[in-house]
Amino acid sequence: MNKIEKILVAPGVHWVAIPDEDLYILCGCPADSVKHLMKKGLINTVETDDLSYETGPNAILLSDLKLQNGHFANLAEFPILQMLYRQGMLIPNHPNNTGIKPILIGREEVVDAQMKYIYRGNYGLTSEEEMVVAGIETEKAAELMRLKLSFAFGQIHPSEDLLEGRPVYNEKVEVRNGVEVSRLATNHYCFHYKGEKAEVDLNLKENEDYQTPYELSYHHFKREYFSVVHTGEGDGWDVNRPCMSSILCFQGRIYLIDAGPNIFHSLNASGIDINEVEGLFHTHAHDDHFAGLTTLIRADHRIKYYSTPLVRESVTRKLSALMSIEKDSFSEFFDVHDLEFDTWNNIEGLEVRPVFSPHPVETNVFFFRTLWTNGYVEYAHFADIASIDVLEGMITEDVKSPGISRKMFHETRENYLIPVQLKKIDIGGGLIHGKAEDFADDGSEKIVLSHTALELTNEQKMCGTSVSFGTADVLIPGAGEYSMREASNFLMGYFPDIPKSDIYMLLNCGHQVFSEGSLLLRNNERASKVYLILTGTVEFISAEDSHASILSSGSLIGDIEVLLGYNNFGNYRALSYVDALVIPGSLYKDFVTRNEILDEIKHTQDTVEFLHQSWLFGESVSSPIKTRIAHKTDILSFKKGESIPTVPGINMLRQGEVELISKASNGAKLKVKPGEFWGEEAVLNHETSFSKTEACENSTIFQIRDLELLREIPIVRWKMLEHWEKRLKALE
């Protein structure tokens, strides 16, 4: 029998076990890695002396790279929580509380970053001073700190009190009891034990993503005046459902409430392209409500971020610790809008009232309302809350002791029980979540029970209802066709100088809904229609090399084929439910001819197509924005051996080969192949790592020098950050 066991759990996630030494290592910990272990049977429930608890990992090997293919590679918060509490490693008098701490293994800077991120995940803001910075008055900050200490059992512990770091350098490092680990290359490690070894590669392949542990059904919902679509009723341990979340639709615009793990999967199943998202309302920074922030960065515009300054400060400190970036960088990726506690904040007709909710980290729940025929219609979203009996047990009159005042207790209970038309509540129970029974006498018209992985009890069913993924509660039906508003915006973005009367002519064409998996345009088909994607996403698979690229809302399909009389060269396939404006080909040709823009379209098309096929611009960057970039692109040619001047901007290699020579003493060289890019340091405000750039072959470069245009596209900026990090690792 082998002394080292290795199992591939999911892309980028492995399991290494050395049973003789009671060492079980989770290798790679992207979002929902615990759920993957559960589904693989690597976490099980056992009983000892009438005590029920879980098995699982007791060490984690971290990725060298903070990001892989745009997503967080290291989210150790929930795996660590599983070890400390569900396995019992931190619980007094528990058989698994042996004094041995969970171990974090990896590059020193990565281990340090995870320690800081877990610290913020446990506690959020950790001093009255930090709360004051977030705009809280001194007296209130003292009260909130008492509450926090009560949840923390009286003391804020540094991560080092709970976890053991094991930095890995160039030599073998002992993990425990003769088990050693060595680093072979970036994200490539080897475990050694008694003459055996097991290699682990944490790298994702090109175009490979971390897996979602559950499947979701596809839905197509009508954009209403005011509605709520239920997209998550589980918790961080539910292997079958997304974590608690909702989509709020107001006047046809899409807002998200929280951004949990695998949110892209939920959006796609709901027929929503990331570029359709107007804003995010954020309750707090725990990973089951936070881990999807990188998905929202994968948009071609800065999504609006709505929360109180208190929660925003907690979130940005956690994100900056996780990514080792300045917390002010948050506003580079999101359009931040602070909300005032206990006040109706007006957001273009949608009124939002955040209310403080007691939780280990800074948390606000939300009330939403809008005026209608018989007064206000309201929705309340309560994630996360505390149970009434837990809060009551925290009451103390000693203002210097951990706990809460009787006043805070009554205010919290009163806020929880305000009746509304629709209320979604956290019923996760335990020390930090709510109970359905607390809402037994709530006067709300409908209560949705959420934030649990367990089957509902009969007592809970008496208090509220369960919903399945994609269920919509329409609070105010929409009388208009809101998608046409977006169609107008898209067409005016494409054709800013065209008379509006001609734009309205195109808008008068009908639209069609395509179900997931259906083809809009087939390979070798003569295009007779032009499709403008209004909602959802479409995948283009090239007939030449089977390369797949994603077309977001706002993209035109079949336009060039119609104008030039070409047959289509690939398949356009709906990845979700897709709503598209359908323009007859003859009308579109007449429109282009009438406005004399064919030459302009042909001039930019080659550049747009190149951008579309690239990794940097091919995902989620809408066609109107790619067109803007194409207008700002210079095409340069260099002969073999010629030096390429360093200028602030992005250089994309169209053809040939280019060599980058490092400034470091080793003079390391990196090759750039067609489709790749360099120069991201200028956009990220970093100093260049290269002293010289030279053409190894006759080369053509697309150069984009409009830095501000690039900085305003979050997904491009995010990919540059990932690329820059990988390049620094390659130069070591």
Image (cartoon, rainbow, N blue to C red):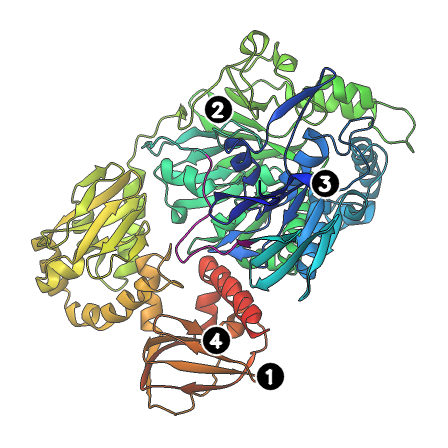
Disc 1 residue type (three-letter): Asn
Frontmost residue, 65 versus 131: 65
Magenta stretch, residue numbers:
199-213
Is the residue under label 1 in contact with that under label 4 (CB below 8 Å)?
no
Image: 272 above or below 235: below
| Crowd band around label 3 with a 10 angstrom C-alpha radius: few (<14), some (14–19), many (20+) | many
Q: Residue at x 72, y 25 (%)?
A: 431
C-alpha separation, residue under disc 4 versus residue under disc 1 = 20 Å
Residue 282 in view in this figure: no
Label 2, secondary structure: give it: strand
Q: Nearer the viewer, mark 1 or mark 3?
A: 1
- Return the x and y of residue 329 as percentages of the image width and height: 60, 59
Q: Which amino acid does label 3 sit on?
A: Asn
Distance, label 3 to label 4, CA atoms, is: 38 Å
Q: Which numbered marker is on residue 122? A: 3
- Spatial CA distance of label 1 from label 3 is 42 Å
Q: Which mark is residue 666?
A: 1
